[in-house]
Image (cartoon, rainbow, N blue to C red):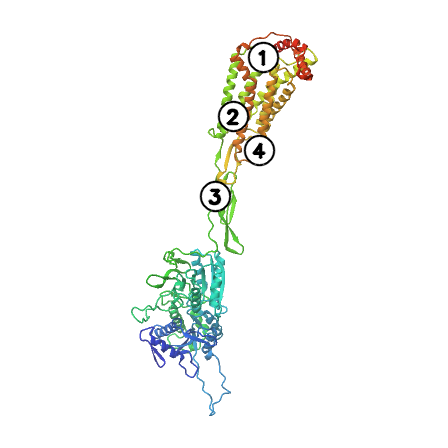
Amino acid sequence: MVYEGKRLVSCHCFFLLTAKFYWILTLMQRTHGQEYAHSIRLDGDIILGGLFPVHAKGDRGVPCGELKKEKGIHRLEAMLYAVDQINKDPDLLANITLGVRILDTCSRDTYALEQSLTFVQALIEKDGSDVKCANGDPPIFTKPDKISGVIGAAASSVSIMVANILRLFKIPQISYASTAPELSDNTRYDYFSRVVPPDSYQAQAMVDIVTALGWNYVSTLASEGNYGESGVEAFTQISREIGGVCIAQSLKIPREPRPGEFEKIIKRLLETPNARAVIMFANEDDIRRVLEAAKKANQSGHFLWIGSDSWGSKISPVQQQEEIAEGAVTILPKRTSIDGLERIARDSAYEQEGKVQFVIDAVYSMAYALHNMHKDLCPGYIGLCPRMSTSDGKELLSYIRAVNFNGSAGTPVVFNENGDAPGRYDIFQYQITNKSTEYKVIGQWSNQLHLNVEDMQWANREHTHPASVCSLPCKAGERKKTVKGVPCCWHCERCEGYHYQVDEFNCELCPINKRPNANRTDCQLIPIIKLEWHSPWAIVPVFIAILGIIATTFVIVTFVRHNDTPIVRASGRELSYVLLTGIFLCYSITFLMIAAPDTVVCSFRRIFLGLGMCFSYAALLTKTNRIHRIFEQGKKSVTAPKFISPASQLVITFSLISLQLIGVFIWFAIDPPHTIVDYGEQRTLEPENARGVLKCDISDLSLICSLGYSILLMVTCTVYAIKTRGVPETFNEAKPIGFTMYTTCIIWLAFIPIFFGTAQSAEKMYIQTTTLTISMSLSASVSLGMLYMPKVYIIIFHPEQNVQKRKRSFKAVVTAATMQSKLTQKGNDRPNGEVKTELCESLETNSKSSVDLVKSGSTS
């Protein structure tokens, strides 16, 4: 470009030759007095203002610093290029020339405010009545340019400051880079528009990126000012609304950082090491200095930077600190390079500055608004008509908000009611390859995110993205116990016992018939077991029962075959068969207790559980009672007591047995037998060992009640056995019955603590069933062994003793027995163990023969 008086002529190039830097710099610093310091002024029919950060912010006390080649010079030339193209376009503002008045903001809002006063000078009336020239002539004031609209500024803080002035004078403003959400407030910044989307869209895009990468614990870092603070505020608000993203720390970079300030910021960020992702809404200078501080702290690869459009795809923030910036994800409004970009050389790595497109779109937006306004206000008029020359900015604003054209990127340029452009962003990642470093496009955002995660690359050169979470996800079967006030932080607690994981925060107890599955995410049915025949708990009692049944059968067969022999008759045949039946039932109940429970088995268990013992002890009680009554009666008279005949004995025995059966039938009527599955019996501490036990509905109390009557008979029989202990040894079975009952009582006394002491054991079913069956088999074996095995032995091996004795009268028998009892008592009172007298000697023979007579007579 060359400067020819008041006309800017294009040489069909855009920028960027080195000589042009000096030309622009000279132009910006050219002075006509001091009026146009740090500005460019080109005449035209309509003058547009421009605000660009040609220089950086100066050090303390100095408003302007070093020259900004990209954000300043590139963008400034973009406006000049756009104005030149519009002035050459015969279809856009024909016969109307656009001029410019471009000011340098020096990246400082207060300085920009001072500069922007230039734009409103034409609208301020000057009172020259008190001013006179030295020669007395009236003063001649240079008329300032009337600014129709302003392009800029770049920084949001600058735009906010300038917008407050321009709205007072109704001058429309179109920004090419200011994205602070605050500027969307149409009640405060009603003359402000922008061709870039507000940071509320950018913040939404950043939240979507964080969520897509599975990060829920991040820190935020903002440059002090409207851009940084508003951007972070928007990010925080959106993340709070959608939930799932927590802010670990929210740090601010001061406008005038003190030495060591950035090192402190890095130190603060490292206080929450799990929050590796850092959301940055900061200006370019602050970004560079934050990366420098992270590099000094040797934190390469730790931080996961998420940069706003102020970082975008710029090279300057990452120069000489590429490793610390590797993997940074940045956002930039969707853009394309303008075809008129000039390159220094064929192989140059230079890239067009990111906001150039938006500068051009902002200028064209103003031009189209003026063009449409001219058509409406000056129909058929060549050049500016008086109506348009006197129009105010409010009317122009309405045309600005109504523009709709395809911008330099080929996308529509439109404004909503707040003057905001739609949100369209490119997502970049700064990647280091073996050959070069570059910003690679990894996705787009336009109301929703499209992210190519597989194209991302991190500091470890792996494609799997790292984590930035407060707490790792809980494993299956673990619930989250959140930290108060920080929903993204939690402790994982395993669902213990019989609890399973309902959702990520709660565990619930499984139903009684279920247990948690292996990973505790659901409940499954508890296996049901029963006592199996092959179990060691069943083999032992079954073996004993089989032996007992064989022995009992052998005794019964022997007695039947020798039914009329004296020993069988003397033992009381009828009651013996009843007793042997009871013994057989005691052995047989073992098979019912081990058999798989069903309604039939449970019914037989109720009937025969106490019936075998009832048969046995009812018969023994009848026997001991008969003996007791005989000898008690003999002490009083020689008359035989009543009901000692075999028939009477059977009636008494079966009367006692019938009480047991009546109780069982009442039990049937009240509570019909059925099976149940007991899930509490083997509900172990470890659910995987839990089992449901299939059993009959016979509780421990019901069992005691069923056996209680038989135990009562047993105790009563034992009492009678004690009372008849003085009967002569040769009389009936008083002594064997006594020994039998003593032994049986010991067995059942041992049974009670074993049976009830294992009620809380996981092996309860096995122990109690085995204990009960063995106790019943042992008590039956004691009766069989002590009462009948000696008789069988004589019958088989000593048949010569199984012969009929001489019969005597009942009176003789009782007399002999009584005398023998007295003899025994008297002998015990004599010294030196002399137990016999002459009387005893004379009665000895009679006693033996009398006892035999009673034995034989008792069965006749």
737 or 510: nearer the eye?
Answer: 737
Q: Badge 4 local density, few (<14 within 10 Å), some, or many (20+)?
A: few
Circle nearer the N terminus (4, 2):
2
Q: Which residue is mark 1?
A: 570
The alpha-carbon separation of the residues under discs 1 and 3 comes to 71 Å
Element type at mark 3: loop
Picture disc at residue 522: 3
Tag nearer the camera, 1 or 3: 1
Give how far across and how far down residue 704 sits, in percent.
Answer: 59, 28
Q: Which residue is mark 2?
A: 590
Give how far across and how far down residue 824 sits, in percent.
Answer: 66, 15
Give how far across and how far down residue 650 sits, in percent.
Answer: 60, 16
Element type at mark 2: helix
Q: Which residue is mark 4?
A: 757
Say which amino acid is labelled 3.
Answer: Asp
Q: In the image, is 10 to the left or to the right of 801?
A: left
Say which amino acid is labelled 1.
Answer: Ala
Specify the quadrant of the image occupied by residue 73: bottom left
Evaluate if marks 1 and 3 touch, with contact meaning CB atoms under 8 Å apart: no
Say which amino acid is labelled 2.
Answer: Thr
Circle nearer the N terminus (1, 4):
1
Give how far across and how far down residue 102 sits, in percent.
Answer: 41, 76
- Against 812, residue 262 (above or below) is below
